[in-house]
Image (cartoon, rainbow, N blue to C red):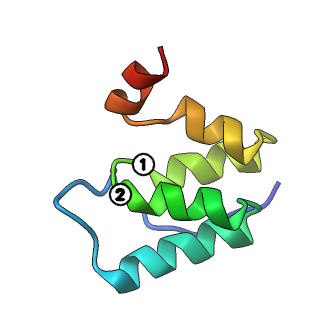
Amino acid sequence: MIAHPMPRTGPARGLGLPDDVRDWRKRWLVVSGFPARLAEAVVADPGFDLHALLQLVDQGCAPELAVRILAPMPEREALR
């Protein structure tokens, strides 16, 4: 298991994230095994809880499945 030292915060909600925050989030995801395209899609939606995604991946969950599990509610409804 890989420990990711990250601050404990909830989902980053709002109109958008500053570019430096988006870049930081994408770097963490790619380093943690997320394909670059998936990481970009996740950072485009500030409703994702990055800490929770990385916890699932650390526990052996595939990045794609972790994203589906933790998809913000509008995404979950669209998948039905």
Q: Which amino acid does label 1 sit on?
A: Phe
The kind of residue on which mark 2 rests is Thr
Q: Nearer the viewer, residue 38 or 54?
A: 38
Which SS class for mark 2? loop
Q: Local crowd at mark 1 within 10 Å, few (<14), some, or many (≥20)?
A: some
The mark found on residue 4 in the picture is none
> Which labelled disc corresponds to residue 9?
2
In the image, residue 17 sits, relative to residue 37, either above or below, namely: below
Q: Do the residues labelled 1 and 2 touch (CB within 8 Å)?
A: no
- Displayed quadrant of residue 73: top left
User: Gap in Å between the C-alphas at discs 1 and 2?
Assistant: 11 Å
Q: Is mark 1 on a helix, strand or loop?
A: loop
- Classify 26 as above or below 70: below
In the rendered view, does 28 fall on the left or right side of 43? right
Residue 70 vertical placement versus 26 (above, below): above
How many neighbours does mark 2 have within 10 angstroms: few (below 14), some (14-19), or many (20 or more)?
A: few
The residue shown at (69%, 69%) is 30
Q: Which residue lies furthest to the bottom in this view?
A: 20
| Residue under the image location 38 percent in, 86 percent down | 20
| Residue 49 in the image, given as x and y percentages of width and height | 43, 49
**Is residue 18 left or right of 29 when viewed as pictured?**
left
In the rendered image, residue 7, in percent from the top left (x then y), is placed at 44, 67
Which residue carries the number 1 mark? 48
* Residue 8 in view in this figure: no
Query: Residue 37 location, x and y as percent?
Result: 63, 62
Q: In which quarter of the image is the N terminus?
A: bottom right
Residue sitting at x 59%, y 62%: 39
